[in-house]
Amino acid sequence: MSETGGYSPKNFAVVGAGPVGCTVAAFLARGGCEVTLCDVVPALLEPTLDPGIRITGTDDFQARVGRSTTRVDLLGDDPPDVVIVTVKATALPIIASALEHFIGEGRYVVSWQNGIDTERVLAERLGKKAVMRAVVNYGCLLEGPAQVRLAFHHRPHYLQELDPTAREAALAICRVFTACGLDTCHTDSIRNMVWRKTVNNSCMNPVCAVTGKTMFEVINDPILFGLVDALLKEGTMVARANEISLGSDFYLDCMDYIKSAGRHKPSMLQDIEAGRITEIDYINGKIREYGQRAGVPTPYNDALRSLVKGLEPG
Ligand SMILES: NC(=O)C1=CN([C@@H]2O[C@H](COP(=O)(O)OP(=O)(O)OC[C@H]3O[C@@H](n4cnc5c(N)ncnc54)[C@H](OP(=O)(O)O)[C@@H]3O)[C@@H](O)[C@H]2O)C=CC1
Ligand SMILES: CC(C)(CO)C(=O)C(=O)O
């Protein structure tokens, strides 16, 4: 028996046809998987079937998905083996309740998102056995329906099951993703990896969202760089106080990651520009929450959270 126990998922549903979901769907479809793409916006879905999702930037190809739907609950008519959730974290409760009707034994849901505790929101409704968490390491923008520009792609991505009984399934999902060109490593320390990514997001996303600047512009502005540095150090202190290990290389790795992103607009700035609610509560808001639990003050995260909230639609 292989280490994946013979489990080999073939049918995938991707919930969210934004840049992140279109990217997953395109890689899986190009790799020969059956892919159903789901989004509440019909105009985003139509071209994903024909002519297909166009990926440009660090990767360059076009791939068609097999099916699309505007309703998560309709995925249950022909249930996929795996559902990849690529919506903003704020939409999770409603998605979890729509998935509840058909996610059971042998079917899995992956939180392919940013933010702390997204997997918990899913697991509260769907149970731990069904839920997996991933850390996504590409940056992208939707230039039009089904047209994604990948600004950077720092392979690999990371994934872990919440319940040990789903380990073989998680390994198999990593294997399929990797075979499709979306290199994904199984990890036993997803919580640490999520915090590494979130502290990174907590520096860049709100500062870009508030100033309207790209990552390149922020990192090259001495005053804004000082703010990024302070947020990075504050997030690191909160992680440490909660016994989360970011690793001794974290500060330098994080700076390299940010510097290599170029003139990219993080998802939070994309949200502000589109007049949407942001994920601030799952990023800086979570650092504040975990800081409070451990008695670590978080003045920089508190201030950025308030400023972003002030920019969100009422
Ligand atoms: N953009 C990036 O570069 C990166 C983003 N991420 C993370 O990936 C996740 C997805 O990001 P991104 O693709 O930018 O997000 P988007 O908000 O651009 O795309 C999500 C899509 O899902 C739709 N949606 C919302 N609710 C539902 C629902 N109930 N059923 C079906 N569709 C729904 C949204 O519609 P509507 O807009 O109408 O709500 C939107 O079209 C986030 O957690 C983000 O932080 C991670 C790495 C990089
Ligand atoms: C900025 C980026 C691409 C990586 O730090 C990201 O995760 C986001 O846009 O939310």
Image (cartoon, helix red, strand yellow):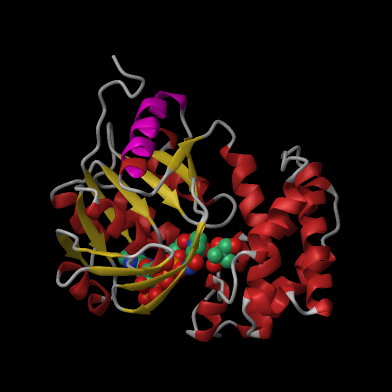
Left or right, 170 with respect to 79, comes to right
Q: Quadrant of residue 264?
A: bottom right
Residue at position x 82%, y 56% from top? 233
Residue 154 placed where, x, y %? Answer: 52, 54
Q: Quadrant of the N terminus?
A: top left
Ligand 1 image position (quadrant): bottom left
Residue 145 placed where, x, y %? Answer: 29, 78
Q: In which quarter of the image is the C terminus?
A: bottom right
Residue at position x 38%, y 38% from top? 174
Left or right, 38 with respect to 269, comes to left
- Magenta segment includes 170: yes
Q: In this view, does 43 lie above or below 71?
A: below
Q: Quadrant of residue 285?
A: bottom right
Pick whichever, 222 or 301, lies toward us: 222
Pick whichever, 269 or 164, lies toward us: 269
Q: Residues in magenta?
A: 164-177
Residue 289 placed where, x, y %? Answer: 72, 55
The reply to whether residue 201 is in sight is no
Q: Is residue 245 above or below residue 199?
A: above
Left or right, 142 with respect to 223, comes to left
Left or right, 127 with respect to 298, comes to left
